[in-house]
Amino acid sequence: MEQYVIKGGNPLVGEVEIGGAKNSALAILSAAVMTDETVYIDNLPDVRDINVLLEAIQKIGAVVERIDRHSVKINGSTIGDISVDYEFIKKIRASYYLLGALLGKYKKAEVPLPGGCNIGSRPIDLHLKGFRALGARVDIRGGSICANAENGLVGKHIYLDMVSVGATINIMMAACMASGYTILENAAREPHVVDIANFLNSMGANIKGAGTDVIRIRGVEKLHATHYSIVPDMIEAGTYMMAAAATKGDVLIKNVIPKHLEATTAKLLEMGCEVQEFDDAIRVIANKRLRRTHIKTLPYPGYPTDMQPQIAVVLALASGTSVVTESIFENRFKYVDELARMGSCIKVEGNTAIIDGVEGFTGARVSAPDLRAGAALVIAGLAAEGITVVDDIVYIQRGYEDFEVKLAGLGAEIEKVSSEKEIQKFKLRVG
Ligand code: EPZ
């Protein structure tokens, strides 16, 4: 199993380029099969989740051709199988986007029911409620969701009981090829919801209001070819902003949309960072100990749940007591026990973490419990005194391209290793 080994203490200084948004790409790659013409997609992040989904799309019969590390050509005209293998859903839950895409195009689809994951139970009842509202018959058989609309899908006025990114996207994909008009109320407003709506419109769909809580969709018969570039990843960008803050660094994060990072920027300013915004870049400077603040994760444009572990690490080193409330997922504090091994002082009460800032961390051996918590533990290692080894980095590789390479480019002493021998060599090299 691969690990990261880190010698902490270096302030991160320099420039880092942000890639395409993983969570947007997962939806857009699924939607690409909704036309029988060829779709070109650029600015794809080269991460594990994307590569697994491309395999799933190939497995159902679409032609997938990698042009380069960040570009792909997809043609869905040769799809012969509308059921997705369990192995793919087990690896990435977001394969369930193929449900909305295949149901929209073929009026039937079969996808294994995704299990829970490390951050919570994560039901998909709202997705299924939306498909049923559009006229599909949806049954759970043998662990799979079998959706069927032999009389076609018909547009409807749908109200989502709670804000759900996945349900908003999945229902939007099915509705864009239904007959008639769909109104989706209480829709998610994340930038990647807007990105998938723009992508579908570039294929001839008729979707209005994405980015607001009411999305209006007029169904179309067919979708056509397009050439599309994925939006920059606001969570990858926010992760490097927090790494700069935690290490008292000075980092220019390039190829971002500052507006998408407003909640993160606001919190860093509250904590005493200097943040400079440019057209497509953000600079974070932290040259003194930061101060406490309170965080409550909310749907966009509120503070993102995917940025919760990362800011908790920065607050664990700030002066004073901070409170972090996780209102989206029920089990997103698993990194707290790992962070305690590095000297943090955090108490978790239900969905709230009370964080007493400490002067500094000491390096330790820790294990990544999930994608964003894993990235947060790397940030802690960068700020700690001494050596940190992060195990189970396969979680981190799911969503961060070249994480250790980009951090080393900012002056971090970090390497990806896969044996104790390599860890010893690293320790000898860094002294
Ligand atoms: C997406 O997950 C992201 N994943 C998550 O990012 C992100 O944390 C989340 O949105 C919130 O922003 C992808 O885009 C692949 P939700 P999703 O539906 O769509 C409940 C990462 O680190 N819910 O907005 O699954 C659900 O349990 C990942 O990149 C239902 O109850 O999130 C949660 O409490 C982690 N029923 C809340 O809604 C449903 O049918 C929000 O979930 C659907 C969701």
Image (cartoon, grey):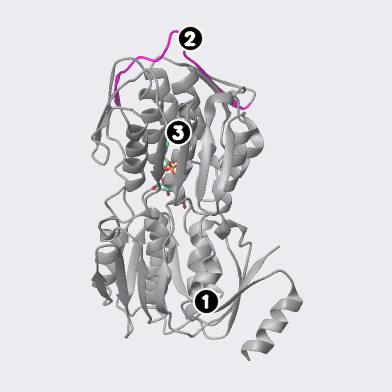
> Does any portion of residue 369 appear in the rendered image?
no
Tag 3: Cα neighbours inside 10 Å, few (<14), some, or many (≥20)?
A: many
Q: Is mark 2 on a helix, strand or loop?
A: loop
Q: Does the magenta stretch include residue 155?
A: yes
Q: Which residue lies furthest to the top in this view?
A: 151
Give the image location of residue 319, x and y in percent. Answer: 33, 80
Region in magenta: 143-158
**Location of mark 1 (residue):** 408
Q: What amino acid is found at the position of numbered circle 1 in the picture? A: Ala
Amino acid type at mark 3: Ala
| Badge 1 or badge 3: first in the primary sequence | 3
Q: Which amino acid does label 2 sit on?
A: Glu
Residue 306 belongs to the span the image colors magenta: no
Please tell me whether residue 13 is drawn above or below residue 101 in the rendered image. below
Residue 209, position as x, y percentages in the image: 23, 35
Label of residue 150 in the image: 2
Single out the residue that lies furthest toward the bottom.
431
Q: Quadrant of ligand 1?
A: top left
**Disc sitting over residue 31 in the figure:** 3
Residue name at image x 72 percent, y 82 percent = 424
- Seen in the picture, residue 28 relative to 240 is either above or below; the reply is above
